[in-house]
Image (spheres, grey):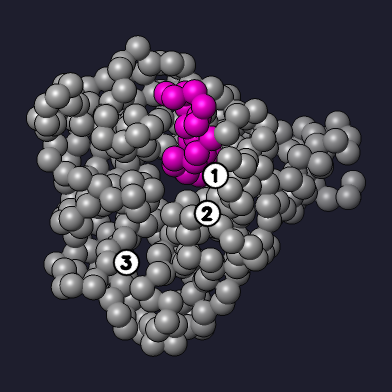
Amino acid sequence: MGFFPDEVIQMILARLPVKSICRIKTVCKHWYRLASDKYFVQMYNEIAVKNPMLLVEISDSIESQSNLICVDNLRGVSEFSLDFLHTRVKVRASCNGLLCCSSIADKGAYYVCNPVTRELKLLPKRSERPLTRFYPDGEATLVGLACDLTAHKFNVVLAGYHRTFGHRPDGTFICLIYDSDTNKWRKFVSFQDDQFSHMNRNQVVFVNGTLHWLTGSSSCILALDLDCDVWRKISLPEEVCYASGNRIYLLESDGCLSVIQISDVWMKTWVLKDYYSEEWHAVDRVSLRCIKGLVPSIFPISQTGECVFFATHKQVLVYHWKSRLWKEMYSVKNSSTLPLWFSAHAFRSTIFSCN
């Protein structure tokens, strides 16, 4: 490939999987330099974020180490492990190729890692007491990961309601934010009265420098602006129907907030085109009659302008907007301790370094 300019070689390499990039670096010094160049890393990540995937934890038993299954619309299914962390962990959040994991054995220990490049960072311990006592593991109510590919930094957010021993929570919402630039945590306190379901906590969306969660009642979106440490609420589309049987989910779609509503027979999708004026646009309405038997257990996890990934109890499905076709991408061959949707996250395969 000596007769190709370096820029052309880099454009070709930018279409390869991350594991192939790691192998390419061992070919020769010239290719190592090309694959390590800041321009190439930026170009690779910009292409990668346009190809969302679905990441799900698979475990044969509660005691065993979980394996991660990555479902890619372009390359199919791949499997990798978090054994390089040398401890059992639970994936709490995913953003632009990085995962935020909490240690099961060491309560309060959090890792940020890139599961493809196998880089990791153990976050410094916090001096704060556990944020909440609502859950057996003593973890925060909300865990968010914000990975900014342009600024080359990431933030981890732990937030939860304070409750003094023997008393009900008083609405005091404590928020701790880790900044990779300073390698330190900062804290601020506010007042909130929202609750969050398991799926709401899993589906945290990072756009416009802000982390977003759908509240448990699906009445609004709770947003945390990481630049000024301020919570605010974003209204849902006026057309959203709160009738019995309807389920609402928060996702990202090509850099925008998106809301999907699933009823017995229809799936409706909206995208927040104007973020600051909260202007929602209806994108599509899809009949679910052809998968009627799966509707009660189907959960949208990740999407783009071309397709949307769903997780059920034992399957991963993809729906293509243009062709209107459903396709099974993965199914569990043996019994699983938890449904796939319980541990499913949106994912993108990037070469962003957590160090």
In the image, residue 336 lies at what x, y percent?
56, 57
Q: Does the magenta stretch include residue 68?
A: no
> For the residue marked with disc 1, what is the amino acid?
Ile
Q: What element carries label 3?
A: strand
Residue beneath label 1, please? 62
Residue occupying the far top of the picture:
127
Q: What element carries label 2?
A: loop
In this picture, which residue range is highlighted in magenta? 89-110
x and y percentages locating residue 91 in the rendered image: 49, 41
Report if the CB atoms under discs 1 and 2 are less than 8 Å apart: yes
Residue 94 appears in the rendering:
yes
| Labels 1 and 2: the sequence-earlier one | 1
Residue wearing tag 3: 260
Place residue 25 in its image quadrant.
top right
Residue drawn at (52%, 79%) of the image: 326
Q: Nearer the viewer, residue 247 or 270?
A: 247
Q: Residues within 10 Å of mark 2 (few under 14, many from 20)?
A: few
Residue at the image point whose x is 49% and y is 74% from the top: 319
Place of residue 115 in the rendered image (x, y in percent of width and height, measured from the top left): 62, 40
Q: Alpha carbon of mark 3 to alpha carbon of mark 1: how far? A: 32 Å
Kind of residue sitting beneath label 3: Ile
Disc number for residue 234: none
- Residue picked out by circle 2: 337
Q: What element carries label 1?
A: loop
Tell me the residue at 16%/44% (across/down): 194
